[in-house]
Amino acid sequence: MAEFEKELEQLTPKVYAELDLDKEDVEQATNYYYERDEETVTRAVNKLKNLYKQIGGTPPSSGPPPPDVDLPKFVEICREYFAAMTSTMQSVLDEVRESAGLPPHADIPASEVPAVQKMFGSRVEADGAAALKGKFGVTLDAFQTLMDKYQRIPQVGQVLGQLQMQQQAQFEQMGLKEGMM
């Protein structure tokens, strides 16, 4: 991780100089489009954050959590996000079944799991973002900030664990057997 950050620190000034920009210009433009939920910018920012997380870092949140979101409201937001993920999976499974010529409620064969993973991965973040923005006016970045704020509270861990177990059971009912995702 340290090596990645060191290389990033060395490369960043070169890119800024090459494009005649500075850090503030990039942050201002990114925030402008990200707050307006500009799809290509939101997707790019989220991909970079996910890449940074996978490498082992914790991406910085973009400010304080929304002040009007207390713990019960956050739990409600989490439920909505999980519902959006489950809905995305149902849609993906329906498409994979159709393209593979499977009956509507057939179990997904292991050979189709890579297609499911790819389609789900490419859609879940945007679908979750749309659900949160539509119902609560919360961006994914704000959701992550809220998660950072509340994740250490035992009740939140219990609720998230329950939501994950419920989601796994729903995935299995949809025909995606345990261990396939």
Image (cartoon, grey):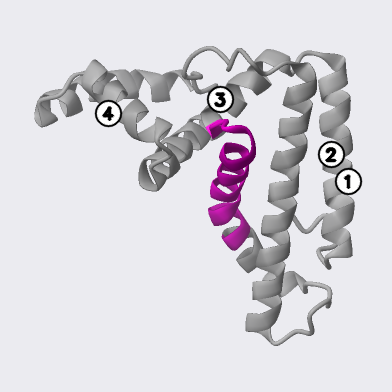
Please state the horizontal and vertical placement of residue 117, each as a whole percent of the image. 64, 59
Magenta segment's dominant SS is: helix
Measured in 3D between alpha carbons, the distance from the residue under mark 3 to the one under mark 4, in whole angstroms, is 18 Å
Vertical side of 43 occupied by 158: above or below: above
Position of residue 128 relative to residue 103, above or below, is: above
Counting residues from the N terminus, which is met first, the one under dot 4 or under dot 2?
Answer: 4
Kind of element beneath mark 1:
helix
Residue displayed at 57% across by 32% down? 137
For the residue marked with disc 3, what is the amino acid? Ala
Looking at the picture, which amino acid does disc 2 mark?
Leu
Give me the residue at 10% from left, 26% from top: 20
Q: Is residue 56 above or below residue 105?
A: above
- Residue 142 - label: 3
- The first of marks 1 and 3 along the sequence is 3
| 1 and 2 marks in contact (CB < 8 Å) | yes
In this view of the protein, can residue 17 be seen by the observer? yes
Would you call the spot at circle 1 few (<14 residues within 10 Å), some (14-19), or many (20 or more)? some
Mark 4 vs mark 1, CA separation in Å = 39 Å
The kind of residue tagged 1 is: Gln
Q: Position of residue 120 (x, y in %)?
A: 62, 57
Is the C terminus in the top left, top right, bottom left or bottom right quadrant?
A: bottom right
**From this viewpoint, is residue 178 visible?**
no
**Residue 15 point in image, percent of width and height:** 18, 28
Nearest to N terminus: mark 4 or mark 1: 4
Which residue does the numbered mark 2 point to in the structure image? 163
Helix, strand or loop at label 3? It is helix
Left or right side of 59 for 20:
left
Q: Residue under circle 1? A: 166
User: In this picture, which residue range is highlighted in magenta?
Assistant: 119-140
Q: Which residue is mark 4?
A: 29
